[in-house]
Image (tube, helix red, strand yellow):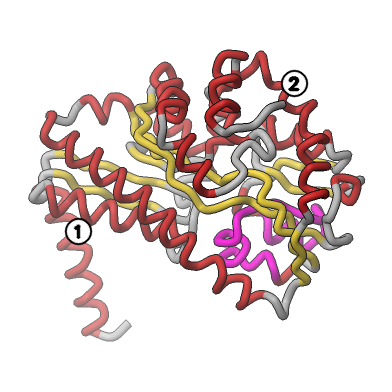
Amino acid sequence: MSKISLAAAIAAVSFSMTQAQAADYNFTFAHVLIEDTPNAQAALRFKEEVEEKSDGRINIEVLPAAQVGGDVEIIEQIQMGLVDIGIPPTATLGNFEPRMQILDLPFLLSDYDTMVKVLDGDVGREILDTLEDDSMHAFNFWGAGFRHMTNNVRPIETPEDLEDIRMRTMQAPVIISTYENFDANATAMAFTEVYNGLQQGVVEGQENPLANIYTMRFYEVQDYLSLTNHAYHAYAAVMNKGSWESLPEDLQEIMIEAFDNGRDTSRELTRQQEDEILENIKDNIQINEITDEARNAFIEASIPVYKEYEDIVTPELLKKTTSAADIEY
């Protein structure tokens, strides 16, 4: 390293340490996403907004790309107060609060407007509040878009096309159950292991929103992308309950506003990028959309999953959520 580069690095570290020392509150914000994904960019903007509007009273250190572990480990560290803030997927949070799994029921949210109506409305708030008993305070739902399926066996055009395909899923019971119900072989695997798992043939397919498929380069090791839009990939913005309660009211208001802006940024950046992503990968992977008839077949095939999870997420919450989403099961 040149003397100039070394001096710059030392200055950057010293500046960061000075900021932390000057702050009244120092929080860590951990997630598994690499830095050029929409939600990782939203996390950085959240940090900047909080630090600026709090006049430096709050310092936030963002730890991206699974630096402290996968989503399960990050959630556990938030509960213990080792990490203060995170944006874990709702499906993974379902391992800690079963009712959170409701948002990952297949084909629950039909489009973007329905997603906003449900997640940002009274039902969404009720779902977020279930985390209070798990040492977490939840603010809102960030998002990476609707999830789609990729694989190396065949285009997915009907539920039957998933038969016997080894599909990687998140460590989430409701998603594992969904693929088992479609007669696929579901395999839970940490997000950071998926590329190698696909490359080595440990799994043959996976599901993710386009932003993750692109930034993690899954399209390099997959032959088919099916635009199924079968579930919205929501991240719950959460904070250790003790860390949140340690803040005075004026700083809490700054944090709430920044979390809302972070949510809007994550969704806006995601929508802006999706058409560009499809254009960029179309020469590397075969892309197909499912027909309305096929979508109805998928919805019909999903009904047993709703029945299985009705008591887990509670009949009352399921009724409220499906009503808000304008669907019947």
| Circle 2 residue | 308
In the rendered image, residue 45, in percent from the top left (x then y), is placed at: 29, 57
Instruction: Find residue 2 and name its label.
Output: none
Residue 292: tell me if it is visible: yes
Q: Quadrant of residue 275?
A: bottom right
Q: Earlier in the sequence, mark 2 or mark 1?
A: 1
| Vertical side of 86 occupied by 47: above or below | below
Residue sitting nearer the eye, 159 or 68: 159
The residue that label 1 is drawn on is 16
> Could you say where residue 54 lies in the image, as x and y percent from the top left?
11, 46
Above/below status of 216 relative to 143? below
Q: Looking at this view, is 86 or 296 the one in front?
A: 296
Crowdedness of circle 1 by 10 Å Cα count: few (<14), some, many (20+)? some
Query: Mark 2 or 1, which is nearer the eye?
Result: 2
Q: From the image, which quarter does the C terminus lie in?
A: top right
Which amino acid, by three-letter code, is at mark 1? Ser
Compared with 212, 303 (above or below) is: above
What's the residue at 56%, 22% (across, down)?
A: 99
Image coordinates of residue 164 in percent, x first then y, are: 91, 46
Q: Residue at x 76, y 38 (%)?
A: 299
Task: Please count the marks in the image.
Answer: 2
Residue closest to the eye, 293 or 250: 293
Extent of the magenta region? 194-219
Q: What secondary structure is found at the residue carrying circle 1?
A: helix
